[in-house]
Amino acid sequence: MNFKKLLINTIIIFLLCSLIHFGYTLFPNTLTSIFCPVNESIWEHLKMIFTASFIFSILTRLVYYKDHNFLIKTFLRGIITNIILLIIYLPIYYIIGEKLILTMILLFISIFISEYIISKLSIEKHQYNLIGAITIIITYLIFTYLTYNPLKIDLFYDHNANKYGIDILNK
């Protein structure tokens, strides 16, 4: 994949993240709580990135090309982006705290690196799509469970609102 396509993919996923960020705030219900962040914790933003990657993968599958293994690549796109972001973001976050512009830049870089890695993957066997579908479902089940039953660790803590999880848990 050439640089221009990597950059366009990165921009689209980044913009999807921006839209998904406000999904639960605009439409607070169970469905949006599964796919959108319900607070400002790091964990909830990982869900946002995964959802943006998921939507992007579906759109590219429908519009651009027929990749027979798009579901496993969809899962890997979201997970790889989240892992890269955590690796570069967490050390900086614990040293200097939350800086919105820096967080946005690191998110963009993480998406770009992930897109590069995904572009280099060559998955030949068609049965990996079943594994992709199963892992996507499991990932959303984990995200949903931990949205409603967050661990009491910093990754799940919303420092802005001084709470864990979704609002109904804090009443």
Image: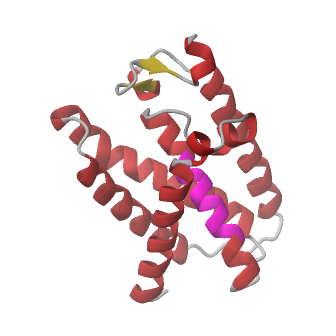
Q: Which of the 4 image quadrants contains residue 63?
A: bottom right
Q: Which of the 4 image quadrants contains residue 16?
A: bottom right
Tell me, yes or no, whether the highlighted magenta stretch contains residue 71.
Answer: no
Q: Position of residue 100 (x, y in %)?
A: 28, 48
Decide if residue 97 is on the left or right side of residue 81: left
User: Which residue lies at the image location 44% right of the left edge and 32% below the top edge?
Assistant: 41
On-image quarter of the C terminus = top right
User: Which residue lies at the image location 83% right of the left edge and 57% below the top edge?
Assistant: 130
Q: 47 above or below 49?
A: above
Q: Position of residue 22 (x, y in %)?
A: 53, 48
Q: What span is colored magenta in the figure?
A: 48-58
User: Which residue lies at the image location 65% right of the left edge and 59% below the top edge?
Assistant: 54
Decide if residue 69 is on the left or right side of residue 149: right
Tell me, yes or no, whether the highlighted magenta stretch contains residue 50.
Answer: yes
Q: Nearer the viewer, residue 109 or 97?
A: 97
User: Which residue lies at the image location 24% right of the left edge and 52% below the top edge?
Assistant: 102
Q: Nearer the viewer, residue 30 or 60?
A: 30
Q: Position of residue 79 (x, y in %)?
A: 55, 51
Q: 154 above or below 87?
A: above
